[in-house]
């Protein structure tokens, strides 16, 4: 399955962050675009919307670091 990181992970507006040092751009985690992952469960919220429990890995810009995540994501971020 594919996860849309732009919808999955809350963060500051990237357009407000300009002029970052190269070490930050290269070594920082990329939380945009798409990544593959695994879907483990679905749950319906009291609002009627769905969330999925997923595991996925995000990488740094230079692919030297990675972080394995297991978290609940909105259904709009999940493409089974």
Image (cartoon, rainbow, N blue to C red):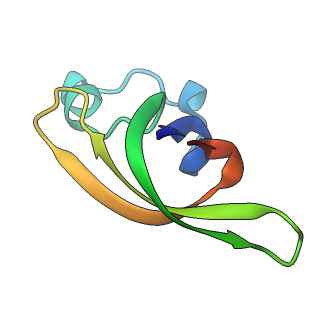
Left or right position of 4 against 20:
right
Give the vertical position of 25 relative to 69 (above or below).
Answer: above
Q: What percent of the width, then of the height, locates residue 48?
A: 88, 68
Corner quadrant of residue 49: bottom right
User: Taking 77 as reference, is 60 left or right?
Assistant: left
**Going 35% across and 27% down the picture, which residue do you hit?**
20
Q: From what the image shows, is residue 20 above or below residue 59?
A: above
Residue 35 image offset from top left, x and y in percent: 40, 35
How many numbered marks, from 0 up?
A: 0
Residue lying furthest right: 47
Position of residue 21 in the picture relative to residue 41 (left or right): left
| Of 42 and 57, the residue lying toward us | 42
Q: Hey, which residue is sitting farthest bottom in the picture?
A: 46
Residue 46 in which image quadrant:
bottom right
Left or right, residue 49 beside residue 3: right
In-front residue for pair 25/45: 45
- Which residue corresponds to the image point at 53% horizontal and 50% vertical from the top-left? 9
Residue drawn at (56%, 42%), measured in percent from left and top? 80
Residue lying at 50% horizontally and 30% vertically, measured from the top left: 17
Q: Position of residue 43 (x, y in %)?
A: 68, 72
- Residue 31 lies, in percent from the top left, at 43, 39
Q: Is residue 71 above or below residue 45?
A: above
């Amino acid at each position: 399955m594919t996860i849309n990181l732009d919808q999955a992970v809350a963060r500051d507006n990237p357009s407000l962050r300009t002029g970052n040092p190269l070490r930050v751009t290269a070594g920082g985690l990329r939380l945009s675009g798409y990544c593959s992952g695994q879907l483990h469960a679905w749950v319906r919220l009291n609002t009627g919307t769905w969330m999925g429990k997923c595991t996925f890995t995000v990488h740094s810009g230079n692919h030297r670091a990675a972080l394995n995540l297991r978290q609940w994501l909105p259904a709009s971020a999940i493409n089974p």
